Image (tube, rainbow, N blue to C red):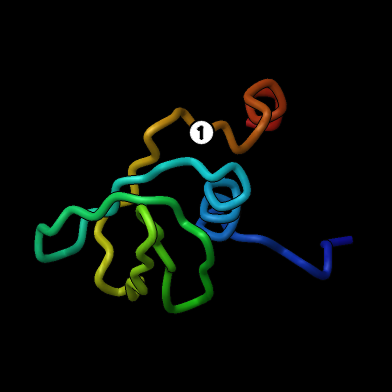
């Protein structure tokens, strides 16, 4: 039976970055580069903290999220066996 709480890749990725306080670089659709740590997110926005400042960034304005450190969301061995 499918779990009642199905998580999507985006939420899993953002939650991993938030929990681990992994620094990220956000590229916006207009080319602006923002750097910081994701402290919160919902369906429409991401809260990015850098130094003592926070920025609320709307997801529709984000083009790319690049973590500074490598991220492994799933066990590669299990993924290979399923495919």
Q: Callout 1 environment at 10 Å: few (<14), some (14 to 19), or many (20+)?
A: few
Question: Residue 62, located in which quarter of the rendered image?
Answer: bottom left
Q: Position of residue 39 (x, y in %)?
A: 52, 60
Identify the residue at horizontal 57%, vertical 60% (top origin).
Answer: 11
List x then y, in percent, for residue 23: 41, 42
Q: Position of residue 36 (x, y in %)?
A: 36, 51
Q: On screen, 9 above or below 71?
A: below
Q: Quadrant of residue 72?
A: top right
- Using residue 4 as the reference point, say whether residue 18 is left or right of it: left
- 65, above or below 1, in the image: above
Quadrant of the snapshot with the C terminus: top right
77 on left or right of 20: right
Residue receiving disc 1: 71
In this rendered view, identify the residue nearer to me: 13 or 5.
13
Give left or right: position of 57 versus 7.
left
Outermost residue toward the top in this view? 77
Residue 7 in the image, given as x and y percentages of width and height? 66, 61
Q: Residue furthest front?
A: 52
Q: From this viewpoint, which residue is outermost toward the right? A: 1
Residue pictured at 33% horizontal, 75% vertical: 58
Relative height, residue 32 to residue 22 (above, below) = below
Quarter of the figure that contains the N terminus: bottom right
Q: In what element is the residue under mark 1?
A: loop
Residue nearer the viewer, 20 or 64: 20
So how many labels did they put on this image?
1
């Amino acid at each position: 039976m499918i779990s009642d709480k199905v998580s999507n890749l985006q939420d899993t990725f953002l939650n991993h970055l938030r929990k681990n306080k992994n620094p990220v670089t956000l590229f916006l659709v207009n080319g602006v580069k923002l750097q910081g740590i994701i402290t919160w997110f919902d369906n429409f926005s991401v809260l990015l903290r850098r130094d003592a400042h926070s920025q609320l960034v709307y997801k529709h304005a984000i083009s790319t999220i690049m973590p500074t450190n490598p991220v492994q969301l799933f066990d590669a061995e299990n993924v290979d066996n399923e495919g």
